[in-house]
Image (cartoon, rainbow, N blue to C red):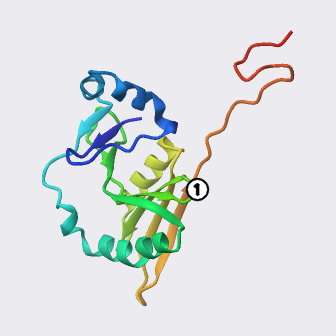
Amino acid sequence: MVLQARRDREVHVTRRNSALRDLLALPRGREVAEREGLLVSAPKGKPPASEMPKWEAAYEREVLMPAQHVGEVSRWRWHPFRFVLFPGERQSYEPDFLVEMRDGSLEIHEVKGFEREDSIEKFKTAAQQHPWFRFVMVTREKHGAWTVTRRIERRLTTPARSEGESPEGVRRA
């Protein structure tokens, strides 16, 4: 897993990506992660949060804020990090919102005025590489309603254990 963190924001690290969290907890962990290409600073030139694009600002105002008010959403972050899709290449994907739901699950929300083929492919690739997030792509209809156009949800699974095997993989006597 590779994340690019914005300089002005913390990387949101959860239990599911504990290897990166453990590395960042070491005294020089951030330096090692950056050197190995696991964590790269996002490029300069992004607009500040006060200059959020109109589609994303409308989604935040019309969907996320009301959902937080009724208790469905705990919190969210705009452009929290960037996924490097193919290490060594310059293709990356920066989700519009990281949304923490009331139950603690994490969703990536991508807001589109219209869908382009390249953005759909990046969305699908990121969803395939990071199954611990639920990926949701939304667009706004002409009459003003927000519509979920794509939803990708993959569950992390644990390998099946044979009978008599402990969780650590050691056979019981």
Q: Secondary structure at mark 1?
A: loop
Image check: 117 left or right of 104? left
Q: Residue furthest top?
A: 173
Q: Amino acid at mark 1?
A: Asp
Q: Residue at x 39, y 61 (%)?
A: 117
Whether 117 is drawn above or below 36: the answer is: below
Residue at 25% across, 41% down: 90
Where does the image place residue 130, in percent across and percent down from the top left?
48, 43
In the rendered image, the quadrant that contains the C terminus is top right
Q: Is residue 44 left or right of residue 145?
A: left
> How far from the left and from the top, in percent, is residue 30?
27, 28
Is residue 91 positioned above or below 39 on the image?
Answer: below
Res 153 quadrant in image: bottom right
Q: Which residue bears the numbered disc 1?
A: 103
Which residue is painted at 49% across and 72% down in the image?
67
Q: Position of residue 141 (x, y in %)?
A: 43, 83
**Mark 1 Cα-neighbour bin, 10 Å: few <14, some 14–19, many ≥20:** few
Residue 99: percent from the left, percent from the top? 44, 58
Q: Is residue 19 above or below residue 132?
A: above
Work out whether residue 67 or residue 88 is closer to the camera in this orientation and state it.
67
Q: Quadrant of the N terminus?
A: top left
Q: Which corner quadrant of the image does residue 20 belong to?
A: top left
- Give me the residue at 37% from left, 25% from top: 23
